[in-house]
Image: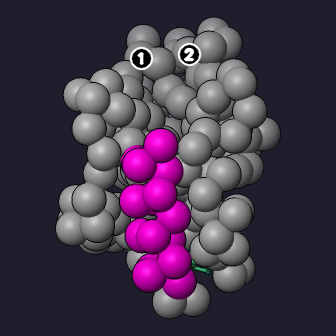
Amino acid sequence: MPDAHRLTVNGRDHEVRCPDGTPLLWVLRDRLGLTGTRYGCGVGSCGACTVWVDGQPTHSCDTPIWSAAGKSVVTVEGLTEAGPHPVQRHLIDGQAGQCGYCLSGIVMRAAALVDQAHAEGRHVEGDEVRAALDGHLCRCGAHNRIVDAVVSAGGE
Ligand code: FES
Ligand code: FES
C-alpha cells in the first residue's frame, strides 16, 4: 500500500496515500480537487503550477509529495480568506489576462512579492515585478498588462 502523507492545504489538514514521488500538483488537482493550479510543462520551466509551500512560491509539478509532507501549502483557491487578493483585483480591473492559463501561477508569485513589500512598508517597482515573473511563461503575450496590474497592486 502506498505511504500516507500528511499536509495542510489552504488551512485544512489532509492525509493522502500515494507513492513518495507523486508530484504535489497531482495531489492538489486529482486528489483534492483544487484544479485552479495548472499543469503547463511539468518540468519546472513555465511557472503555471506555482503554489506556496511554507510561504515560498514553489513549482508543484516538480515537488514530490514526500517533500511537502508536514508543510503548509496555499493554492490560488486559498490565497485569502477575505476575497480577492489585491493582485487578483488589479488583474481583473486591468483585464490583464487573455486565456488566463498562466494566471494562477502568476498570482501566487506576484502576491508573495506584493505581500513581502507591504510587510516592509514599501511599494513594488516594475523592474522588481519583471524579475519576479521572469520564469512565468504567458503564451498569450499579456506580460505588459500583467506587470502593470502587479505594480498597481503593490502600490496600494
Ligand atoms: S507546470 Fe510546473 S513549472 Fe511548468
Ligand atoms: S493569459 Fe494566456 S497564457 Fe497568459
Q: Is residue 101 at least partly visible in the picture?
A: no
Residue 53, label in figure: none
Q: Amino acid at mark 2?
A: Thr
Q: Secondary structure at mark 1?
A: loop
Q: Is residue 95 above or below residue 131?
A: below
Residue 148 magenta-highlighted: yes
Q: Is residue 126 left or right of residue 48?
A: left
Q: Earlier in the sequence, mark 1 or mark 2?
A: 2
Relative depth, front residue between 12 and 80:
80
Q: Name the side, left or right, on which 86 lies relative to 95.
A: left
Write down the residue under mark 2. Answer: 8
Percent x, y of residue 119: 31, 25
* Residue 124 sits above or below residue 140 on the image: above
Left or right of 91? Residue 68 is left
Left or right: where does residue 93 sit relative to residue 96? Answer: right
- Tell me whether the residue at label 1 lies in contact with that at label 2, contact meaning CB atoms closer than 8 angstroms: yes
x and y, in percent, of residue 45 in the image: 33, 70
Instruction: Give me the residue at 61% from left, 40% from top.
Output: 85
Q: Which residue is mark 1?
A: 71
Instruction: Determine the residue positioned at 53% across, 83% down.
Output: 142
- The reply to whether the residue tagged 1 has its Cβ within 8 angstroms of ligand 1 is no
Q: Is residue 41 above or below residue 77?
A: below
Within 10 angstroms of label 1, few (less than 14), some, or many (20 or more) residues? Answer: some
Q: Residue at x 69, y 40 (%)?
A: 84
The magenta-colored residue range is: 142-156
Q: Percent from the top left, x then y, of residue 23?
A: 48, 45
Name the residue type under label 1. Lys
